[in-house]
Image: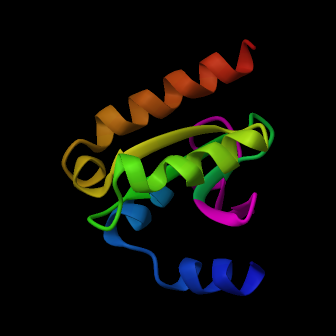
């Protein structure tokens, strides 16, 4: 999985690059890592300490197709948050607000 994660880090989408520019270096108050292996999958971003996984979904994704992926990641104790790429690009502030709320919820659990 490490090789796959490295390739995905090199080949990030525009939406992933934009979101990473806001998540890196603890800008959201927590440390996030990108392209992190969890349960046989590689999540786009993860806050390991709070067990939050963030997925950026493009056209190849669907709720039905990602159900098994989400279940496997959740089985490892992560809360999965999904955003469509177009939502990240067109409503970045809204996406960041949602992530901030999820961080607060996870801190209070």
Q: Is residue 86 left or right of residue 26?
A: left
Q: Is residue 5 left or right of residue 61?
A: right
Residue 66 rendering spot, x and y as whole percentages: 47, 53
Q: Is residue 90 left or right of residue 15?
A: left
Q: Is residue 78 above or below residue 61?
A: above
Residue 35 seen by the camera? no
**Res 28 quadrant in image:** top right
Residue at screen point 55% across, 26% down: 102
Magenta segment: 23-43
Residue 96 rendering spot, x and y as whole percentages: 41, 37
Residue at screen point 72% across, 12% down: 108
Quarter placement of the N terminus:
bottom right
Residue at screen point 58% across, 44% down: 27
Is 31 magenta? The answer is yes
**Res 105 quadrant in image:** top right
Residue projecting furthest to the top? 108
Residue 94 rendering spot, x and y as whole percentages: 30, 32
Residue 76 rendering spot, x and y as whole percentages: 79, 44
Q: Nearer the viewer, residue 31 or 109?
A: 109
Q: Is residue 85 above or below residue 27?
A: below
Q: Nearer the viewer, residue 94 or 70?
A: 70
Q: Nearer the viewer, residue 26 or 71?
A: 71
Q: How is the image coloured?
A: rainbow
Is 54 magenta? The answer is no
């Amino acid at each position: 999985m490490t090789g796959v994660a490295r390739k995905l880090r090199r080949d990030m989408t525009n939406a992933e690059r934009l979101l990473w520019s806001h998540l890196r270096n603890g800008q959201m108050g927590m440390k996030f890592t990108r392209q992190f292996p969890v349960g046989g999958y590689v999540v786009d971003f993860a806050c390991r300490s709070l067990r939050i996984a963030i997925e950026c979904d493009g056209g190849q994704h669907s709720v039905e197709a990602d159900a098994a992926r989400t279940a496997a990641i959740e089985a490892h104790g992560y809360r999965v948050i999904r955003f469509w790429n177009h939502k990240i690009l067109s409503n970045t502030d809204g996406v960041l607000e949602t992530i901030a709320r999820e961080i607060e919820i996870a801190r209070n659990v």
